[in-house]
Image (cartoon, rainbow, N blue to C red):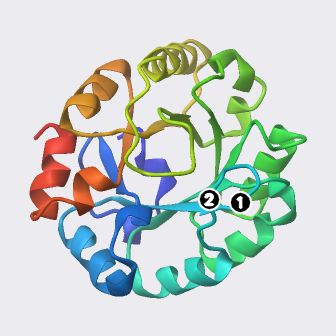
Amino acid sequence: MSWSHLVRADERHSNSPVAVAPSLLACDFARLENEIEAVERAGAEFLHLDVMDGHFVNNITFGPVLVEAIRRVSTVALDTHLMIEHPDRYLDAFLDAGADVLTIHIETSADAPRDLRAIRNRGHKAGITLNPDRAFTDVLKAVPEADLLLVMSVFPGFGGQKFIESALKTVEDAARFREREGLSYAIEIDGGINPETARRAREAGVDILVAGTAIFREPDYAAAIRAIRGQ
């Protein structure tokens, strides 16, 4: 499993070769604890937390206080995606709150390799991500310091958007580079993921699939997660 290095042994609830990370942004926040318990019972390997500041993206979600609350009730790894400006100023706050994997944007980090090392030096897993209008070459200097590469297949800010096809080439480029250079970062994709786009992403080389509405708008979370995995 090329994603298993991202989680502690006590958080590893699955032996699936492809992991699924439900995006809590799409859940019913009035029933947050129940929603978390439900997707964990349904087989989720991660919970994906979208942190937005209203500057880098045109939406505001939540900060370290809610991450800490989610950590108290969750038993799986928290895959925390910082869609914020100046991420270096907030790394410690989110790590202290309980983020297991902390991902920053190449677009907003003044020194991505430095910030990734700072996360890893705290004993956590570090991720780098790029928007759909960026090429994989834009993160070449960062990925050797990363445990995770998150490929955005929509522009971040809101759920329910249509999948952007060019993301598949980025995944393929990342998978080839990983193999050629002997690196071990996991490849994750986020945006417009449903059973069909998930199949194509898996074929391109993705290890972790982030899905929001494709899980939380379905009546059976376990069946939705299995469909995204292709099971």
Q: Is residue 88 left or right of residue 157?
A: right
Give the SS element for disc 2: loop
Q: Quadrant of the C terminus?
A: top left
Q: Nearer the viewer, residue 113 or 133?
A: 133
- In the depicted structure, whether residue 57 falls above or below residue 202: below
Give the SS element for disc 1: loop
Q: How crowded is the residue under tag 2: few (<14 C-alpha within 10 Å), some, or many (20+)?
A: some
Q: CA distance from mark 1 to mark 2?
A: 5 Å
Hey, what amino acid is under mark 2?
Answer: Asn
- Residue at the image point whose x is 10% and y is 63% from the top: 220
Q: Is residue 47 visible?
A: yes
Q: Quadrant of residue 147?
A: top right
Q: Is residue 207 left or right of residue 217?
A: right
| Identity of the residue furthest to the front in this view | 58
Q: Measured from the top left, where is residue 226 in percent x and y?
A: 14, 49
Q: Measured from the top left, where is residue 163 in percent x and y?
A: 38, 31
Q: Is residue 85 left or right of residue 196?
A: right
Q: What residue is disc 2 on?
A: 59
Tags 1 and 2 touching, CB below 8 Å: yes
Q: Measured from the top left, where is residue 54 in percent x and y?
A: 71, 60
Q: What residue is disc 1 on?
A: 54
Q: Is residue 133 left or right of residue 164?
A: right
Hey, what amino acid is under mark 1?
Answer: Gly
